[in-house]
Image: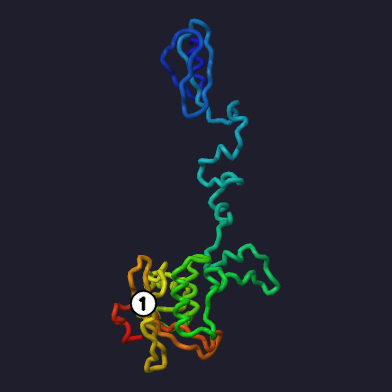
Amino acid sequence: RSPMAALAFGASRLTPTPPSGRGVGTTRTTTCSTRRFSFPSGTRGCVVFASADDTHPSRKNEKPETNSMGNKGFVKGSGVLTMDQLLEVPIKRFKPTSEECPFCRDAPVKENGSKCLGICRNPQNVPGPLIFPHEMQEVTDAVRLQINALRENDEPRSHHGVQVMWEFSVESGNMERSRYFGMTSDMYHYDHFIGKSLKFFGPLVRNKGVTKFCDVSEMDDGRTMVKVEVADDVNKPTFWVFIMVKRSFGKYNRCWQSHRVVQTDASFHSEYLEFI
């Protein structure tokens, strides 16, 4: 038996290749490691051994983790784990705000067992508005202050003008439904109030100022109706009805506050007036 045949017979895996001349044999690329052999001059052909062992010199310097990166059940830092071991690995994630307040997440636990820092109570996380009701204000002053606040809605911070409207609203924070905007809606969530104010009070945002107070009159139920004309951001006249009440208790006792704010036509008529 020729040396070539004996070598092929004893190989665990053998992949013959076409003759490529005399001298040094060539290799064929396989999915595993390859070995190069030299045959004596005059011997034709070559063999390629496919090996799955990790003792090949090219694998000596590889990290064990790298070899298992594509395997199922690989966990960085732990290698390949069984399914039972995978179930024991804790999942690290941030909890949603419904489970954990983002402001208090990293705070130390106090003696009462709570980590609350108190700042999560305000959804906007901002202080009160710079403009607010005061007993020295007349009813027209209270209306003008609200309109001017919406004129500079984003000064000194985003939606500060809407926050002024919220502070002047007598029903802000109430659980009951309200017709503050004319249509029935809730007044409990300040976040909701921002969206509805930007929708219903759109012409007042960046307005050019109060053109004139058309009428101030007391209604049959004791409330005060203020009719006002306001130029919007393109100097187009818009017409509004503010129904105001003087607070008789609480933080703003004896202060004028808004009960209803509704946009009307030039005759100060609105489909909502009979309901509010």
For label 1, count other residues whose C-alpha is less than 10 Å away and answer few (under 14), some (14-19) or many (20+): many
Q: Compare residues 16 and 133 and report the one nearer the observer.
A: 133
Residue 153 visible to an observer of this rendering: yes
Q: Residue at x 31, y 87 (%)?
A: 274
Would residue 171 be seen by someone viewing this image from the given angle? no
Question: Quick one: SS at disc 1?
Answer: strand
Q: Residue 112 at x, y = what percent?
A: 68, 74
Q: Which sits in the foreground, 63 or 102?
A: 102
Extreme front residue here?
A: 212
Q: Which residue is mark 1?
A: 229
Observer-nearest of 158 and 48: 158
Relative to 21, say whether 47 is above or below.
below
Which amino acid type is shown beneath numbered disc 1?
A: Glu
Which residue is located at x 58 percent, y 27 percent?
Answer: 58
- Which residue occupies 49% across, 73% down? 163
Residue 272: where, in percent of width, then height?
Answer: 32, 82
Above or below residue 185? Residue 78 is above
